[in-house]
Amino acid sequence: KRLKEVEGLGYRKISYILYEKGYRSVRTNSILKNNFIYSIYHKGKIREKRINRDFKNIVKDIMIYETR
């Protein structure tokens, strides 16, 4: 996220940087290509929006009954 948003790098350059640092795919141990980097970034943004969303609390028509 930092490489994309702060440093302004493209997905291909991010892929090269991660390859040089030795990062690999978890399942297949393959090189993280630019389309994988895009997918990871995009899904991360969706997850971040879902976690940080706000809800409006509305309480209506509360009734209290006495039971015996």
Image: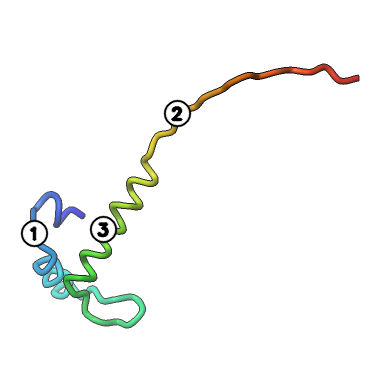
* Secondary element type, mark 1: loop
Task: Choose between 31 and 50: the one closer to the eye.
Answer: 50
Query: Residue sitting at 18 percent across and 75 percent down?
Result: 33
Q: Are marks 3 and 2 in contact (CB under 8 Å)?
A: no
* Secondary element type, mark 3: helix
Residue 1 percent coordinates (x, y): 21, 55
Query: Residue sitting at 17 percent across and 53 percent down?
Result: 2
Query: Residue sitting at 25 percent across and 82 percent down?
Result: 30
The residue identified by callout 3 is 42
Task: Choose between 38 and 3: the one closer to the eye.
Answer: 38
C-alpha gap between disc 1 and disc 2: 37 Å
Please state which amino acid type lies under the numbered disc 2.
Lys
Which quarter of the picture shows residue 24? bottom left
Q: Earlier in the sequence, mark 3 or mark 2?
A: 3
- The 10 Å Cα crowd at callout 2, few under 14, some 14 to 19, many 20 or more, is few
Q: Earlier in the sequence, mark 1 or mark 2?
A: 1
Tell me, for residue 56, which label it has, or none.
Answer: 2
The residue identified by callout 1 is 9
- The 10 Å Cα crowd at callout 1, few under 14, some 14 to 19, many 20 or more, is some
Which quarter of the picture shows residue 56? top left
Q: Nearer the viewer, mark 1 or mark 2?
A: 2
Query: Residue sitting at 9 percent across and 62 percent down?
Result: 10
Q: Are marks 1 and 3 in contact (CB under 8 Å)?
A: no
C-alpha gap between disc 1 and disc 3: 15 Å
The answer to whether residue 39 is above or below residue 57 is: below
Please give left or right for residue 32 compared with residue 52 in the image: left
C-alpha gap between disc 3 and disc 2: 27 Å
Please give left or right for residue 23 compared with residue 50 in the image: left
* Secondary element type, mark 2: loop
Q: Nearer the viewer, mark 1 or mark 3?
A: 3
